């Protein structure tokens, strides 16, 4: 199958002033689109991949096919973790956050520290295990927890292309902006789903 670039679930300027229109234009229309185009090119003549979903390719590939499929998957997940709406964690998710991280504020601080500590390009994830215990996972480059046993709930893209137009080298400022646009309803649904 031909993999298609999903449309952003909000307008390009919807996340301003936290994430700019031009960041989203480049991030979605160039970077995300680029991974999907490359993936389609790479699997064009490979029959074993033709009937697989994106997630199946992520779980059954390696090297450049894996890298491009995973980046396509991770970006879908990232863009669907953001919203211009004011949202908050569901009571069940908030209880789990309080249990694991003491408070929502402390969770954000711990997640932010993890993201700042990730060397180079990658992704910081909130995941849960099969007992619904919450934990943080840093993954470099195109790695993703989707290949493991844990369920991803929230991700922050910490590749420089996610923030360089807005905050240049200041990843901490990007993280501060990130918390203003996290879609807690989406995260809560994943937690309860
Ligand atoms: Mn990205």
Image (cartoon, rainbow, N blue to C red):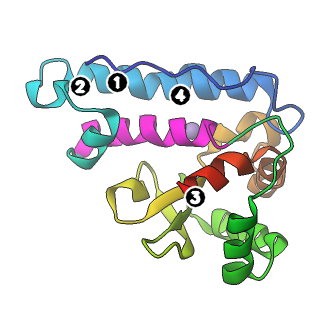
| Mark found first going from the N terminus, 3 or 2 | 2
Question: Are the residues at dot 2 and dot 1 in contact (C-beta closer than 8 Å)?
Answer: yes
Question: In front: 147, or 114?
Answer: 147
State the image coordinates of residue 185 (x, y, percent, origin top left): 71, 48
Q: Secondary structure at mark 4?
A: helix
Q: CA distance from mark 4 to mark 1?
A: 11 Å
Residue under label 2, please give it.
Answer: 42
Q: CA distance from mark 1 to mark 3?
A: 34 Å
Whether residue 157 can be seen here: no
Residue under label 3, please give it.
Answer: 192
Q: Which residues lie in the magenta part?
A: 63-81
Residue under label 4, please give it.
Answer: 31
Q: CA distance from mark 3 to mark 2?
A: 36 Å
State the image coordinates of residue 25 (x, y, percent, origin top left): 68, 21
Which of the 4 quarters of the picture holds residue 111? Answer: bottom right
Residue under label 1, please give it.
Answer: 38
């Amino acid at each position: 199958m031909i993999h298609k670039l999903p449309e952003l679930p909000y307008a390009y300027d919807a996340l301003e002033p936290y994430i700019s229109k031009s960041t989203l234009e480049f991030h979605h229309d160039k970077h995300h689109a680029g991974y999907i185009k490359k993936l389609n090119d790479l699997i064009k003549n490979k029959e074993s991949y033709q009937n697989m979903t994106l997630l199946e390719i992520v779980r059954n590939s390696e090297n450049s096919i894996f890298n491009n499929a995973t980046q396509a998957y991770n970006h879908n997940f990232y863009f669907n973790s953001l919203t211009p709406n004011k949202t908050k964690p569901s009571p069940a998710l908030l209880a789990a956050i309080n249990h694991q991280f003491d408070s929502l504020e402390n969770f954000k601080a711990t997640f932010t520290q993890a993201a700042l500590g990730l060397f180079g390009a990658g992704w910081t994830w909130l995941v849960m295990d099969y007992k619904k215990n919450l934990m943080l996972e840093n993954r470099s480059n195109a790695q993703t927890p989707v290949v493991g046993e844990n369920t991803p709930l929230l991700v922050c893209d910490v590749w420089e292309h996610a923030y360089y137009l807005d905050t240049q080298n200041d990843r901490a400022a990007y993280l501060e902006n990130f918390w203003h646009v996290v879609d807690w309803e989406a995260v809560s649904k994943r937690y309860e789903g």
